[in-house]
Image (spheres, rainbow, N blue to C red):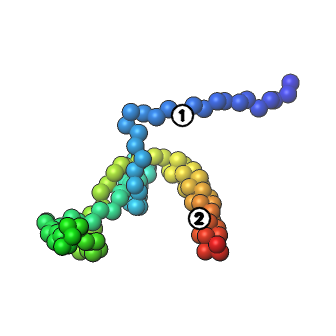
Amino acid sequence: MENKPKTVKVKYLRSDEYRVLPVAGAVVSGTGQGMVICHIYTDLGTPPESSEITFKSDGTIPEEKLNLASEVNRELLVGLLMTPQVALNLSRILGPIADLTNQAIQAAQAAQKAN
């Protein structure tokens, strides 16, 4: 009897809690139970306590100067709890995709400079 490969159709459904999040980085560690916890965060500048806008004589608002924050808040968006194998699988998937995306961006930027 010949072993034929079995095909399984996978359907992806979005949960009601599904969101696209602006990720700036992650803090990752192991747990005492042998799991990997990955805290995904975004960087937020500390807003000023107040600000003042001076209008131009024609009534328009001048372009505001960029004020660099003296501190950055990292807002933890989600914690991903996974087995070490899942963490390894994610790294194997994300690395090559990130490399291909960077190559495409660099190619597009080089083409734009050439035009």
Say which of 54 and 49 sits in front. Answer: 54
Instruction: Provide residue 4's location: percent of width, then percent of height.
Output: 80, 29
Disc 1 secondary structure class: loop
- The answer to whether 6 appears left or right of 47 in the picture is right
Up-down relation of residue 57 to residue 41 (above or below): below
Residue beneath the point at 42% across and 33% down: 15
Q: As shown in the figure, which amino acid type bears the numbered disc 1?
A: Tyr
Residue toward you, 81 or 30:
81
Tell me the distance, in whole angstroms, between the alpha carbons under discs 1 and 2. Answer: 28 Å
Which mark sits nearer the N-terminus, 1 or 2? 1
Which quarter of the rendered picture does the N terminus lie within? top right
The single residue placed furthest to the right in the displayed view is 1
Instruction: Look at the numbered discs 1 and 2 and tell me whether their residues touch, using CB distance below 8 Å.
Output: no
Secondary element under disc 2, as helix, strand or loop, is helix
Residue underneath mark 2: 105
Image quadrant occupied by the C terminus: bottom right
Left or right for 80, reference 49: right
Looking at the image, which residue is at 56% across and 55% down?
94
Q: Position of residue 58 (x, y in %)?
A: 21, 70
In x, y percent, where is residue 68? 28, 74
Q: Which one is in front in this view, the residue at disc 1 or the one at disc 2?
A: 2
Mark 2 Cα within 10 Å, few/some/many (few <14, many 20+)? few
The disc placed on residue 110 is none
The image quarter containing residue 45 is: bottom left
Q: With 110 as the anchor, is 4 left or right in this view?
A: right
Residue under the image location 18 percent in, 70 percent down? 55
The residue carrying mark 1 is 12
Question: Which amino acid does the dot numbered 2 rest on?
Answer: Ile
For the point 57% across and 50% down, the residue is 89
Task: Let me know if residue 99 appears in the view.
Answer: no
